[in-house]
Image: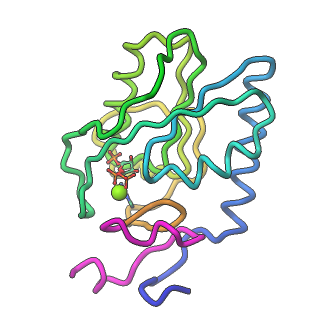
Amino acid sequence: MHPHVEKILLDEAQIKERVLQLGQQISQDYKGESILMVGILKGAMIFLADLVRNIDVTTYFDFMAVSSYGAGTVSSGAVRILKDLDKSIEGRHVIIVEDIVDTGLTLQYLVENMKSRGPASLKICTLLDKPSRRKVDVQIDYNGFSIPDEFVVGYGLDYGEKYRNLPYIAVLKPEIYQV
Ligand SMILES: O=P(O)(O)OC[C@H]1O[C@H](OP(=O)(O)OP(=O)(O)O)[C@H](O)[C@@H]1O
Ligand code: HPA
Ligand SMILES: [Mg+2]
């Protein structure tokens, strides 16, 4: 275990099993269609990479990068586009892939933004949901795990850009968040 980690919330085996289930469910729901998975950088990168390997319908990728947290643990509330999609999503079956839905502000912005581009359908898939922190109502179609109100890192999620490479989802020791 990494020395900065206080506790592991979800270990590698739990994540692997749930990601497999989500992939199977998406494959079933989109049978005969092709899907465009839009990964939200950087956090969703690892989840997306594992998820798509469990999907057996025709799958395309695109990416968007937005940022609202900067270096801290509190959302600034203002969502900035750092990288936009490469191509039009008009008429496509789009799934937004997120690592976590916390206040919901990022997702609300993304859903409104993408709906205006005329996809054939739009669904949301997130690995983690922190429902107790929600500030705006957002509909999640595929959720890996609901977690308590703790700032988590690992499996793509960062604190100050660190810890994304941990293979599990963990909470850091309090003294790490304070510095
Ligand atoms: O529901 P919210 O309160 O809006 O929080 C969720 C968003 O915050 C994180 O992104 P971040 O801005 O940290 O970018 P990152 O993925 O590059 O770390 C996370 O990846 C989600 O996109
Ligand atoms: O708990 C979290 N961890 C990392 N990034 C986040 N962005 C929103 N919530 C979180
Ligand atoms: Mg972040």
The colour style of the image is rainbow
Horizontal and vertical percent for residue 26? 71, 33
Look at the picture and state if 63 lies above or below 48: above
Instruction: Name which residue lies at 75% across and 27% down.
Output: 58
Instruction: Name which residue lies at 35% across and 37% down.
Output: 83
Q: Quadrant of the N terminus?
A: bottom right
The residues colored magenta run: 159-179
Instruction: Name which residue lies at 40% across and 78% down.
Output: 172
Left or right of residue 131, residue 120 in this image: right
Q: Quadrant of the C terminus?
A: bottom left
Horizontal and vertical percent for residue 173? 37, 84
Horizontal and vertical percent for residue 176? 30, 82
Left or right of residue 163, residue 91 in this image: right
Horizontal and vertical percent for residue 157? 45, 61
Furthest-front residue in this view: 86
Look at the picture and state if 86 lies above or below 65: above
Look at the picture and state if 152 lies above or below 25: below
Q: Which image quadrant is residue 31 in?
A: top right
Residue 68 counted in the magenta span: no
Instruction: Name which residue lies at 38% across and 61% down.
Output: 149
Looking at the image, which is closer to me, 118 or 61? 61
Q: How many numbered markers are drawn?
A: 0
Left or right of residue 116, residue 175 in this image: left
